[in-house]
């Protein structure tokens, strides 16, 4: 068979095979009604435009579902508060980039991808461009090991290098990169890896925050508020039952939750108002109580968990 | 060659894997609307059909400005969404948006750190159809300092 005939054969097989698949599940419907609906559906499709069909298809599913996303604030948000609260940059708090060679299992690679990602957010927020490039290269190495080599390309590293004096651009590149990694893992049915990256990043952000918290009231408040995020993280992990990779981390999070249970947050009824620009402001009285002893316990517990993950 | 010219556009109409395309769709069609905000790095996208619901739970920090973007494939129609507090009290609904204001995004500030729930619903078509379209829906959150 010539190459041309072969390509015609492949295309024909794909086309007619897909038509058959599309019509599956509709055989029991009346032909006339199905035909009218097909026309309607084609019209609907044409309204959208052929060029915009990316992200849409004809569904094989009939029953409605409810999808729940448990989302954790990005490590970048904690790094932002650390920097804006006047804290000094402290390289000794970060995971050494040389440790990357120690991470041979998928679990340790995923956790440390999150940890190095939080370090990258921290160095970027403090405009430490040299360190940021080291951490980005380390993140790339782990992302490659985890099969996401197409996310952090040489082109992206060049972009970071050429934007190293532009903090806002760098912050966007870092956020976009971690969003793309998260998406890639979920697309590839590696949701456990995605959850481990998020957990690693959250633990590292908390480690950085607790080490800058002395005499820093806004940061203490933010650490106490992590009680909310820890609950969400535990709910996220609970959605992946029986995943061996996640069970040990889940146990660590449960242990940490016991410490966080000492923190009291009382939130009154939510109130809304609008500011001078017409933007809605969501508020309501709230009080957070965390003793020095509890802060010390949080710091120690996080340090112990982190030490286990980075070894 | 002629065969390819005729059949390739038809192939575009076939049921492609929308799961695999969700990231690309979100990056091209949704991310640009978060310009000026630092996006949350969680990927909250799913392929949904009419009648489906999605919920997002997230902690929003005090003294920050947020943009919540509910971005769905146009084939699903206008998505409905609400923001609720943890007592399930509705704080915002895009059904109340009138005039030229965009219905797919909500800009707000937070005075007190709190958890909020974003509840999204894909509307059912007015007339039932045997062919059900599915499309990508992404919930994105961008933040910046107030």
Image (cartoon, coloured by chain):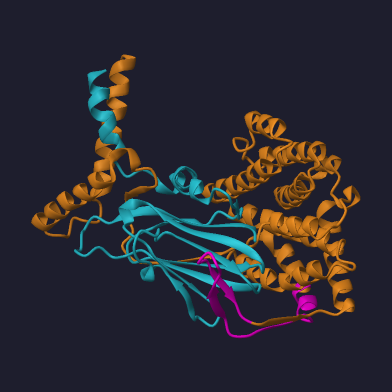
Indicate whether A236 appears above or below B2. below
Q: Quadrant of residue A99?
A: top right
Indicate whether B134 appears above or below A213. above
Residue B71 % position (x, y) = 43, 55
Count all numbered tags in the image, as a single digit. 0
The single residue placed furthest to the top in the displayed view is A2
Does A300 sit left or right of A165 as displayed? right
Task: Note whether residue B119 is visible.
Answer: yes
Does A265 sit left or right of B105 as displayed? right
Residue B134 % position (x, y) = 34, 54
> What residue is rendered at 63% in x and 36% in y?
A149
The magenta stretch is A256-284
Residue A286 % position (x, y) = 68, 81
Chain A: its colour in the image is orange
Report if residue A20 lies within the magenta region: no
Q: Quadrant of residue B145?
A: bottom right
Indicate whether B1 appears above or below A271. above
Q: Quadrant of the N terminus of chain A?
A: top left
Residue A55 % position (x, y) = 39, 47
Report if residue A263 lies within the magenta region: yes
Name the residue nearer the viewer: B8 or B144.
Answer: B144
> What residue is rendered at 58% in x and 67% in y?
B109
Q: Quadrant of residue A135?
A: top right
The single residue placed furthest to the left in the displayed view is A32
Indicate whether A5 appears above or below A235. above
Chain B: its colour in the image is cyan
The single residue placed furthest to the front in the displayed view is A276
Task: Note whether residue A242 is visible.
Answer: no
């Amino acid at each position: 068979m010539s190459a041309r005939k072969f390509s015609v054969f492949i295309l024909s097989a794909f086309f007619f095979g897909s038509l058959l698949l599309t019509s599956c599940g509709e055989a029991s419907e009346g032909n006339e009604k199905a035909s009218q609906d097909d026309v309607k559906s084609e019209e609907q499709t044409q309204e959208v435009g052929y060029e915009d069909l990316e992200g849409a298809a004809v569904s094989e599913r009939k029953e409605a579902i409810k999808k729940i996303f448990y989302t954790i604030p990005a490590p970048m948000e904690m790094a932002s508060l650390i920097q804006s609260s006047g804290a000094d940059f402290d390289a000794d708090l970060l995971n050494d980039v040389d440790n990357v060679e120690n991470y041979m299992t998928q679990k340790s690679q995923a956790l440390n991808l999150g940890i190095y990602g939080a370090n990258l957010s921290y160095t970027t927020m403090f405009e430490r461009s040299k360190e940021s490039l080291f951490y980005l290269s380390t993140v790339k190495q782990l992302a490659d090991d985890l099969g996401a080599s197409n996310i952090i390309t040489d082109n992206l590293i060049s972009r970071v290098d050429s934007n190293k004096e532009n903090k806002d651009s760098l912050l966007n590149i870092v956020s976009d990169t971690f969003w793309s990694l998260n998406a890639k893992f979920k697309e590839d049915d590696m949701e456990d890896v995605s959850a481990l990256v998020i957990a690693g990043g959250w633990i590292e952000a908390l480690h950085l925050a607790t080490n800058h918290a002395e005499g820093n009231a806004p940061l203490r408040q933010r650490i106490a508020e992590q009680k909310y995020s820890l609950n969400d993280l535990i709910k996220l992990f609970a959605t992946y039952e029986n995943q061996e990779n996640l069970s040990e981390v889940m146990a660590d999070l449960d242990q940490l939750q016991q410490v966080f249970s000492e923190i009291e947050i009382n939130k009154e009824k939510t109130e809304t108002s609008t500011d001078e620009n017409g933007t809605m402001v969501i508020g309501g009285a709230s009080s957070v109580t965390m003793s020095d002893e509890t802060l010390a316990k949080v710091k120690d517990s996080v340090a112990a968990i982190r030490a286990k993950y980075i070894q | 060659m002629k065969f390819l010219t005729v059949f390739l556009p038809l192939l575009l109409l076939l049921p492609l894997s929308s799961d695999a395309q969700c990231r690309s769709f979100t990056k091209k069609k949704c991310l640009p609307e978060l310009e000026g905000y630092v996006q949350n790095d969680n990927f909250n996208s799913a392929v949904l059909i009419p009648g489906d619901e999605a919920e997002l739970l997230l902690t929003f920090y005090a003294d920050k400005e947020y943009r919540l973007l509910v971005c769905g494939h146009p084939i699903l129609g206008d998505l409905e969404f609400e923001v609720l507090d943890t007592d399930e009290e509705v704080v915002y609904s895009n059904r109340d948006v009138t005039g030229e204001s965009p219905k797919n995004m909500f800009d707000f500030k937070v005075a007190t750190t709190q958890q909020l729930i974003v509840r999204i619903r894909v509307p059912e078509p007015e007339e039932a159809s045997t062919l059900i379209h599915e499309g990508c829906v992404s919930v994105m959150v961008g933040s910046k300092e107030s």
